[in-house]
Image (cartoon, rainbow, N blue to C red):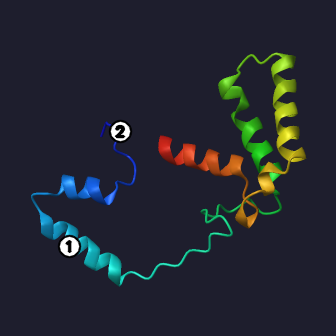
Amino acid sequence: MQGDFFYLKSPDEMAEAYRDIPEALENTHKIAEMCDLKLDLKRLHLPEIKLPPGKTPDEYLSDLCYEAFPRYYANATEEIKERLAYELNVVKKYAVCQLLSGGLGYCLLCQKAKTLCLA
């Protein structure tokens, strides 16, 4: 699917899109009226990813990075190795891996999403 239509459309846009099927809008409204959705907007609602036993999010992210490192940098210079260590220290220093619910870090969530998309 291509296009610039990946957003929530306004009621007017929906009415225009379904002008030939007015019952679609009526039925959608009926269904919406039956829904009782309450969201706690004071916290993030993200999927939980289980960490290996005994690993902190920072340690797990580090393990994943060093495991994948040779695939991306088969002949890594010392400068590249130092850069990876530096970036992992920044993540740890600013507690990026602790920012999200369940102890799961943003970096780990992105890594999991990438893995699922490539599968």
**In the rendered image of this protein, does residue 36 appear above or below residue 2?**
below
Kindly tell me whether residue 84 is visible in this rendering: yes
Of residues 68 and 8, which is closer to you in this image?
8
Q: Residue at x 14, y 57 (%)?
A: 19
Q: Residue at x 64, y 64 (%)?
A: 48
Kindly tell me whether residue 119 is visible in this rendering: no
| Sequence-first tag of 1 and 2 | 2
Within-10-Å neighbours for mark 1: few <14, some 14–19, many 20+:
few
Q: Is 54 on the left-hand or right-hand side of 109?
A: right
Give the quarter of the image for residue 75.
top right
Q: Is 91 on the left-hand or right-hand side of 10?
A: right
Residue 23 point in image, percent of width and height? 14, 70
Q: Amino acid at mark 1?
A: Glu
Of residues 87 and 45, which is closer to you in this image?
45
Element at label 2: loop
Name the residue tied to disc 1.
Answer: 26
Name the residue tied to disc 2.
Answer: 4
Residue 3 point in image, percent of width and height? 32, 37
Q: Amino acid at mark 2?
A: Asp
Q: CA distance from mark 1 to mark 2?
A: 26 Å
**In the rendered image of this protein, does residue 77 appear above or below residue 34?**
above
Quadrant in which the N terminus is drawn: top left
